[in-house]
Image (cartoon, rainbow, N blue to C red):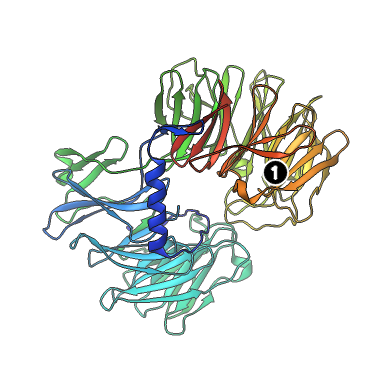
Amino acid sequence: MKNIQGTGISDLHRRIKPFLFLFCFYLLISFTVSAGDLGNGFFDHGVASPNSNQRGVVATVDGNGRNVVLVWLFDHRGTYALQMIDAETGKSEQFPVPFAPNNDAVYCSLLSSKNKLYTLFANHFAEFDPVKRAFTFSKESMPQMTPGMTEDDNGVIWAATYPNCGMVSFNPATKEFRDYGYVYSQNWKQYPVSVAADDAGWIYIGIGITSSQILAFNPVTGKAKTVLNEADRKRGYAFVYRDLNGKVYGKALKDSKDEGWYELHKGTALNIGKHTSINSKPIITGSQGLFYKEFPDGKKIKELDLIDRKLVVETHGGASLQTVHFDYASEGAWVMGIAAAPDGTIAGGTTFPMRFFDYNPKTDKFMDKPAFGQFDALARQGDRFYFGVYPSGSLLEWDPSKPWIDTKEGEETNPKVIAASSLMTHRPHRVLAYPDGKTIIMTGTPEYGSTGGGLVFWDREKKASTVLKDTAIILDQSTFSIAALPKGKFIGGTTTQPGTGGIRKAKEAELYIMNLKFRKVEWHKVLFPEVQEYSDLCLAPDGLIYGIADRKTFFVFDPVKHTLVHQQEIPASFGSTVVKESLRIFIPGPNKEMFLLFKNGIVQVEPGSFKLTMKAESPVPILAGGDYLDGRIYFVSGSHLCSYKL
């Protein structure tokens, strides 16, 4: 079946006039990509991983009948271009998307029966014509991106959108674009991952993940009606597909073999139970992982490697292989965060592609290796370094003194998977190396569609892990920030944010103190009314806890008396705090100083008065943290590793 469905997540971005934004955007990029001395004590060490990621690959032909490969390219800016590669020569052309990528990405694309490529992301629908070698249509739509597309019998392209289940259509013959707005309301972010049209023109949508549903959408009225009764809805993704008989078939849960099927036609649904005769209508569409490899002449893509810039094509039956090399322009992968490693280097991870990098300040060189997922959170303890990994919720241990061996679960690799809980820490937010020298604690939000994350504990001496659920910590919340306390305790700050696509159930985030030995919460409280997240926590030299609430309030907390000592709103002149999954905002200095990373610069806390003072304004945006090493504070600006000399 060529209709490949998938999922993805991207935050809602501001809607800015495209051309004005593009002008400002590329001015910023042209400024930040130049490595070297930035002035004012700041230095750009370069791009951590100079690669882009593919967000869909399609084999087709151009206007001359030559085999070409179309590749959506993603770097730290978002999906910024479409690459066209000649399959015989490797000659390439790169076509910038005709709107601001705005850090968003392609999550689904479709190659139509008329050999045109379609997608919708960053609030824009787009058409690319490989014959004309150009984007031939672009139109702004309701937010935000599509995880599901189809083509109906009249050649009209349909896309359902995340996060509020909108519907759009485009008629390539007339260039008519229709945005129907939102067609189904839920109190969670919806993933309409499968879309199909019957021969009568009705459109059917399979939705997930918190509670599955199938919608029947009438293009004439622009209205949708539900197919599943509330009792039949499941946690997961509903599924629909178009059959060659003209009807659409669907079920409440895509991956379940026990689910009964519905026959869908002209807006009506018939529960038919078992359905074994599946004859899917060929439609070339799929998620960001779409890899359509068949050229019209029978040749196939065997391999496409954006790291090695290599394309391998096989002839009929794989009798022979042809390898060509190509290149593309990239500003580098999105860096998630960094920390000082035991061997005197700065280590971190990127996403899309998911890579590990290690920067040696003494040699001014980077090491770039494949990563076991997305390294969201990281910390050092003694001679070891630890990574919290999305999407597996795994905890990895790396020994920098030994050779790197690409991670494989269950094997003696370096880094090695030592613990995991995809259910509880699907998206890790912090790794705490406790000062006892043997305990590692990983926090995170739960898997997609779930609410309430947990904690993973790793004992280096016993080589054993323990997992705590939210029911043993703070119900329906996840630990977002964490800091060590004396006497075998630690403090955690929660977030009410559920797993991606889940339902927010808690009203306010809390602080809590837990006893490490007994894994028991000794104290917890809503310190600030209406706060939804304790963004970062740090134990200061005076024994107080410094914290950030909702990325806008700086506070000081006495963990012994359980009292608030100080609070203030962060000045707008500082800009926002650093972002990404693990907010390494606080950076302890070498002489008991405490620094904070903000978009506009490095701020210092004055002991006693807790006054925040801008120590150094940064010439580049500070977007992710952050650690101190040998007289420098290191941070991330987009795809670049940068530093400030104290």
Foreground residue among 380 and 252: 380
- For image coordinates 72% across by 51% down, the residue present is 476
Q: Quadrant of the C terminus?
A: top right
Q: Is residue 235 above or below residue 270?
A: above
| Label 1 crowd bin: few (<14), some (14–19), many (20+), radius 10 Å | many
Label 1 sits on a secondary structure element that is strand
Q: Position of residue 391 (x, y in %)?
A: 52, 42
Instruction: Tell whether 149 sits left or right of 318.
Output: right
**Residue at the outermost front position:** 40
| Residue under pointer 1 | 548
Asked whether residue 460 appears in the rendered view, the answer is yes
Q: Amino acid at mark 1?
A: Ile
- For image coordinates 39% across by 46% down, the residue present is 29
Asked whether residue 418 appears in the rendered view, the answer is no
- For image coordinates 59% across by 59% down, the residue present is 210
Q: Position of residue 197 (x, y in %)?
A: 38, 72
Q: Quadrant of residue 190?
A: bottom right
Q: Position of residue 77 (x, y in %)?
A: 42, 49
